[in-house]
Image: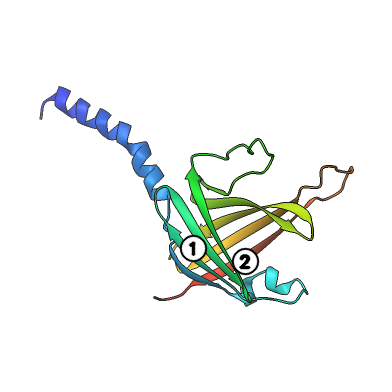
Amino acid sequence: MSHAAAARAAFTALLLLPAVVHAQSMRDFSGTWQMDPSRSQSAQQGEPFKMVTFVISQSAGQVRIEATRGNEKENILYPLTKSRAAPTSEGRAQPEAYWEDDRLVTVTQRTVSGQTVTVKEAHRLSASGADMTVETTVIVQHGYSMPGAKTYGTSEDVYTRLKP
């Protein structure tokens, strides 16, 4: 191989490297996941605990998460974006998902006790892929704030992948 051909091959590899690195950071969260109450903060908060199961279907352009909390079911389709989207003209953000390094982040809005809240969940897989840690941040959207008032809460829960 000539010096010029070797230089072109090295340059081409250098151009493709960011795409390969990015593809490696996008882990596959697809599967059925059940909360491990012994390793989850939500199960330890003193409120009546409801077992949580996620069924995640992931593709290049979207993530579907079917959540079961006790007897309540929720099914949300999150379009995958390159970064956090702006709220719509009505002020409500649409469900969305995006990557932060190797974490899959989902964001949606819900109404809880008449209050609008934003729920952000950062999903991270263990090295083996058998466990998924979900850091949940719930932000209350009440339109005002007081100095020092905390308008959000966080918890970290661990889920194990169920065998098909």
Going by the numbered disc 2, the residue's amino acid type is: Asp
Question: Which residue ends up furthest to the top in the rendered image?
Answer: 4
Q: Is residue 101 above or below residue 55?
A: above
Going by the numbered disc 1, the residue's amino acid type is: Ser
Residue at 62% x, 51% y is: 108
For label 2, count other residues whose C-alpha is less than 10 Å away and answer few (under 14), some (14-19) or many (20+): some
Tell me where residue 45 sits by quadrant.
Answer: bottom right
Please state if 26 lies on the left or on the right of 13 as rendered.
Answer: right
**Quarter containing the N terminus:** top left
- Residue 27 location in percent, x, y? 43, 55
The numbered dot on residue 126 is: 1
Q: Nearer the viewer, residue 77 or 53?
A: 77
Tell me how far mark 2 sits from mark 1, CA to CA.
13 Å
The numbered dot on residue 157 is: 2
Q: Earlier in the sequence, mark 2 or mark 1?
A: 1
Could you tell me if residue 38 is visible in this image? yes
Helix, strand or loop under label 2: strand
